Amino acid sequence: MLSSRSFASVAIVAIAVWAAPPALGAAALFSGDYATGNFSQWPTVQVRGYNSDGKDYVPSYSAGIVTDPVKGNVARFEVRPGDVPPFGGGERAEVQGGAADTGGAEGQTRWYRFSTKFDPTFPMNHGDLGWGVTNQWHQDGSAGSPPVSWTVDGRNGYWSLTIEKQSSPGVWVDTFSIFDTPLDVGQWHDVTMQINWSASDEKGWIRLWHNGVRQTFGNGSDTYFVRTLVPGDADVYYKEGMYRKPTTSTDIVYHAGFRSADSADGL
């Protein structure tokens, strides 16, 4: 699923620029905030022994809803050795949305908001253990890797906004991070992103707010231009949870509040 992740050009931790986060409003293209107390908002849940509709999923250790003192209803995802869904692939516990309302296609500009927290037991050496993905905009086809994702393997003890540049599905050009932040286990990472989706390095771009602060990337810009789609793929769709290379650890991650919209006011 993922490239070898050499991370030869990993960016430095982004410099914070104090600015107000985007305004929040009522309308959204999609809301997967677990306010229902179950997984019915999500079209698909993928865990060990299950790959089907979220409304029919019976919670287990792999994915369940818990009450958080800060966020209210949140999803708790746990991956143990051997936790592979019926269709195979890496070990995972994830939810999946649709391309039309959680992803994007060529020329579309979308806003996204979500929160992620790492359990205090989360391994601080995932760079040594192997690749791991917590949030991703998955490529249209099965070949290749997500062009935009949040990963835990670029640097031990860090969470990274990772770009997988491909010239076509599964043909890698480069893999690198444009933003790194400490895992800060036990604390919520509140993320807002604006992404222009394009297979062109000149037309695709990303803007990021982390914990309410507009970020400046390692190249000195607050708008990072890079292809955000894989050439040859039609679009992307969003997934969150934990997806990883088979390893010996137990990984526990919490997610809350995902929303997507055409404007900041829709978040």
Image (cartoon, rainbow, N blue to C red):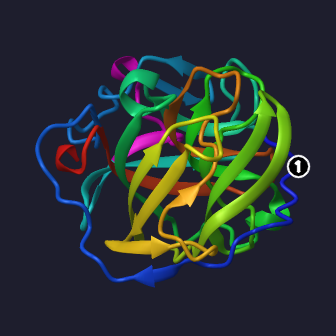
Dot 1, how many residues are within 10 Å of its Cα: few (below 14), some (14-19), or many (20+)? few
Tell me which corner region of the image, top left, top right, bottom left or bottom right, holds residue 39.
top left
Residue found 66% across the figure and 56% down from its top: 162
- Compared across the picture, whether 144 is left or right of 253 comes to right
Disc 1 residue type?
A: Ser
The residue to which callout 1 is attached is 4
Percent across and percent down for residue 99 are 46, 24
Specify the farthest residue to the left: 26
The magenta stretch is: 54-65
The answer to whether residue 186 of the structure is visible from this angle is no
Choose between 91 and 219: the one closer to the eye.
219
Query: The residue tagged with tag 1: helix, strand or loop?
Result: loop
Choose between 238 and 127: the one closer to the eye.
238
Q: How many numbered discs sit on the rendered protein?
A: 1
- Compared across the picture, whether 263 is left or right of 84 comes to left
Percent across and percent down for residue 229 are 61, 35
Q: Is residue 59 magenta?
A: yes
Tell me which corner region of the image, top left, top right, bottom left or bottom right, holds residue 251.
bottom right
Residue found 59% across the figure and 42% down from its top: 228
Q: Is residue 75 magenta?
A: no
Choose between 88 and 198: the one closer to the eye.
198
Percent across and percent down for residue 135 are 54, 47
